[in-house]
Image (spheres, rainbow, N blue to C red):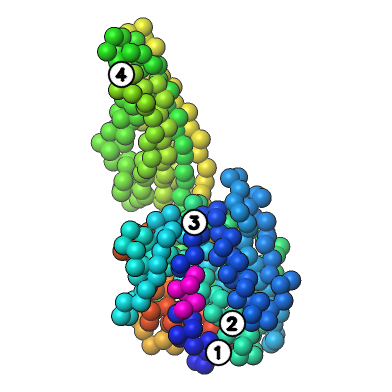
Amino acid sequence: MKIAISDAESLQLVMDMMAIPGRSGEETAVADFIRSQLAVAGIDASALHDDGANRRIPHGGQLGNLVLKLPGTVRGPRRMFSAHIDTVPVCVGSRPVRKGDRVVSADKSTGLGADDRAGAAVLLSTVLSLVRGGLPHPPLTILWAVQEEVGLFGARYVKKSLLGNPKLAFNFDGGSPTKLTLGATGGYRMAIDVRGIASHAGGAPADGVSAIAIASLAIADLVKNGWHGQITKGRQSGTSNVGVIQGGEATNVVTDHVQLKVEARSHEPKFRQRIVKEIESAFKRAARAVPNIAGKRGTVEFDGRLDYEAFRLTRDEPCVAAAIAAVECEDRELELAISNGGLDANWLTAHGIPTVTLGCGQRNIHSVQEELDIADFHAARRIALRLATGPTPIS
């Protein structure tokens, strides 16, 4: 397929994007880069919208999602392409360099940021190819989402009315471009507040109730009974993790306050709810098990929220059928997958826009070993352009 932006130019594009700092909530610089590239291509600034999602996201952020709508040059149902523009903190300071058939960070202490600047670059490259090459295409919506890494917030709070009611949707984020992710797990996050009673750890330890002891007993209970880490109960499965523990100031004080951040995931909503209940029960039991000499006990409070619900598309879903046809043109083995992590597609699908996810060549994401497979990145570009210009399976 003829692409109006060369491989060398597109590779430089993604390397430039990966070098821009832009952790979740701080994406202004990468958004400005996208705006500048579109302006150079001759796209009117009025076609690109900030949907104000940051004003709806509970913790705010520098900006909302970027939404570009291109009128069709041929008739057909609207198609949407999405990718997120934020990166995880380890990628701040990335210095992308080419190393053979890969791109890595020259700074060994940082991640690369290919997750998901590669996806964002695939979308930008597709738009530039369409505009420069004058390629015929149906109406298109391009969504560069913010704050995916901290809970899919951009996709969750997207202004749906700006998207134009797309009938097919394709999300570019992670792994091989020939792997189509048709579904993903659901995730629940919770903050647990453990309150004990402070006392002098040497002079009056029996007067205190250690919040650390309560938390420790609860975690041990979860591990012992198979409710932490990989969870399998009969034919049902899921995961949970205590990811953050904060509390205590001195060794000579019985710690009276500990805060924890915990998550639970499962493809089955009811089983995920059970995991959450088991976590809550373990902490309540632990609080009862740690009285002081006067019989007083600590307390626990829970503040949880659904991050994203599980979903699963069928092979005959129009976006999936279109993606399969586009991937088969690469003459590579097709893989259909279900993810154990959340994707922007979780919320887009929940909004009534069934969305299939394709990779862009990212490897070892969220780590200092992250790299971008150059051949896979270019394959993702070709697939995206086919999806933007090719026939639709909708009758």
| Left or right for 58, reference 383 | right
Q: Mark 3 — residue?
A: 23
In the rendered structure, which disc, 2 or 3, sits on the residue that comes first in sequence?
3
For the point 49% across and 51% down, the residue is 150
In the rendered structure, which disc, 4 or 3, sits on the residue that comes first in sequence?
3
Q: Secondary structure beneath disc 1? A: loop
Residue type indicated by callout 4: Asn
Q: Secondary structure beneath disc 4? A: loop
Q: Are the two marked residues, 4 and 3, in contact with CB atoms closer than 8 angstroms?
A: no
Instruction: Characterize the magenta stretch by its predominant secondary structure.
Output: helix
Mark 2 vs mark 1, CA separation in Å = 7 Å
Mark 4 vs mark 2, CA separation in Å = 63 Å
For the point 51% across and 59% down, the residue is 22
Q: Is residue 175 visible?
A: no
In the rendered structure, which disc, 4 or 2, sits on the residue that comes first in sequence?
2
Q: Mark 2 — residue?
A: 128
Residue 35: x and y in percent read: 63, 71
Residue type indicated by callout 3: Arg
Mark 2 vs mark 3, CA separation in Å = 25 Å
| Left or right for 32, reference 302 | right
Q: Are the two marked residues, 2 and 1, in contact with CB atoms closer than 8 angstroms?
A: yes
Mark 2: few/some/many CA within 10 Å (<14, 14-19, 20+): many
Residue 216: x and y in percent read: 30, 30
Residue toward you, 165 or 134: 134
For the point 61% across and 88% down, the residue is 132
Query: Which stretch is magenta?
Result: 12-17
Q: Which mark is residue 4?
A: 1
Mark 1 vs mark 4, CA separation in Å = 68 Å
Residue type indicated by callout 2: Leu
